[in-house]
Image (cartoon, helix red, strand yellow):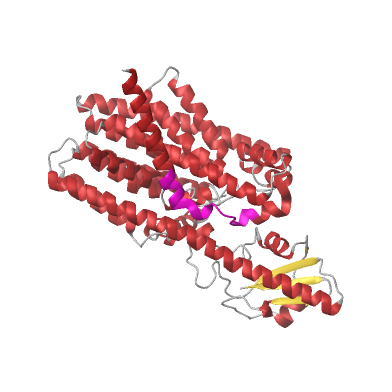
Amino acid sequence: MLEKLKQLNKQNVIRYFIILGITILFCQNFLQMHYSSDTYVLYDLGYMEYPSKYFLLDGRLISTIVCYLAGILNIPIPAYIIGMDIIGIIFIATAIYLINQIIEDIIKPKKNILKLMILASCFILILNQFTLEYLLFPESAVMCLGVLLNVIATKLMVNNPKHKYIKIFFVLLGAVFCYQGVLNMFPVFAILIYIVKQIVDTREYKIKEKEFFIEMIKLTIIVVIVLSICMVAIQIGTKLLNSNQDRMMHLVDMEAVLLRGETVLEYLDELWNTTMHMLPDNTNTIVLIISFITMVILKTKKEIIMQYILLIMVSFIICIVPMFIFNTGICGRVNEPLTMLWGASQIILLAQSTIVNKEKTTKFIYSFIIVSFIINNIFIMQNITEHIASNRVEENMGKTIKYTLEQYEQQTGNMITKFAYCYDQNPQQYAVGIRPIGSLTERKLACSWSISEAINFYCNRKLEPVRMSTKIYSEKMIYKDYKEFSEEQLIFDGDTLYILVY
């Protein structure tokens, strides 16, 4: 018996390190110095000021503590960025390992091929395109810890330990204080696990259905309480720091609601149909169509299909509702459930295939998963590479600005101490030749929340932000529209650098 346990533990360790190795392989381009818009802000403000201006106002207490600790230890920012990504990748790999264990314990696969397919589906479930934003920012490890905590809460839900709901509450509270956006992963995990359990459970359906809805109500109450605590923490932080920041949507009348509804539909088109250009268009819709057709072929019970539809509806609702409450844009990291549906669908198909003897259909499901796994991970590597490429474009632009600035100072004797900017007629969010994949490739030297900090970083100084000169703008910038960076966009006047952002 002891030998069997040792062998089992050895197998688990080997499996974990295989998962970790694969995760590192796919995300390896993050293991070098790279820049998000927040990275420039961190450089500009420093470890101690940065959290009070951003994290505390958003209720991200764990990110605040980690950032302060890095400041106390005086960790160089490049080492901090890369170190946080290494830890983040470990957390993601651990989350994949645990969710794979949970699914295997329910389905109890006997064939190695089925075990491999479950593992591949778990990779797609957790390490999908929108997950990349969790590894993008300086606090990447903390955001990835939030993902892991969601999986741990799911494991508690399945294992049913003593004081289960209290434990789930505290784990989810930890997740929401890592990053609020990761909490919307938990409903997807919870519903998915219960669908899989009901597929393999041989008890009468009415008994299973009653358990399902009672459990969902209890978990919903926990999630609502956790979110309420987080909102209170944000309000307290805002008051203590005397901040005027307000990210809430104030929909004062029906017209405002309808206008916001139109904007939300545009966001959904970008998030669902084009996946923020991270995957081929309509990939998500094709996956759902294939999944529905395969379920019908497998003679899946209508009750299971209805619960699958519920999973899809919940995934959309928990992404749409915050768009009406908060002033959010098109953002992958807070809409993770939409890309989780790919892996979730495949796990449900695998569970159903174990109770139906349809060899050809099972082989099709395996082929579907293998192709999905390959496509998903090819685009993960491509999208991270595109992020690095966008950094290189930004770096070249920053070096050009610095060189031009220093040449001006040498020629005129004037010292540049101030900075102002405005946008041309049709400003571009992405550089020419760079794919528009959200925060991964947005131009940090064009974002209003990071342009000043990025200029300071590349020019290696602390310029004072000032208003754009009306005279400079009307004489040298008005009506101009650039498609790429040019030194013509840099105007020097006395001690001030003016930039026309294309």
40 is higher (above) or lower (below) than 72? below
Give the magenta-colored segment's residue range.
Answer: 21-39
Whole-percent x and y of residue 38?
62, 53
Q: Report if residue 354 is visible in the image.
A: yes
Where does the image place residue 298, in percent across and percent down from the top left? 16, 43
Residue 470 vs 185, above or below: the answer is: below
| Quadrant housing residue 120 | top left
> Where residue 420 sits in the image (x, y, percent)?
74, 68
At a point 66% along the width and 46% down the height, the residue shown is: 54
Name the residue located 34 percent from the left edge and 56 percent from the top edge.
Answer: 375
Q: Position of residue 145 (x, y in %)?
A: 52, 38
Q: Quadrant of the N terminus?
A: top left
Nearest the camera: 15 or 492? 15
In the rendered image, which quarter is residue 399 located in? Answer: bottom right
Between 305 and 437, the one lying in front of the other is 437
Q: Please tell me in which quadrant of the rendered image residue 210 appears.
A: top left
460 drawn magenta: no
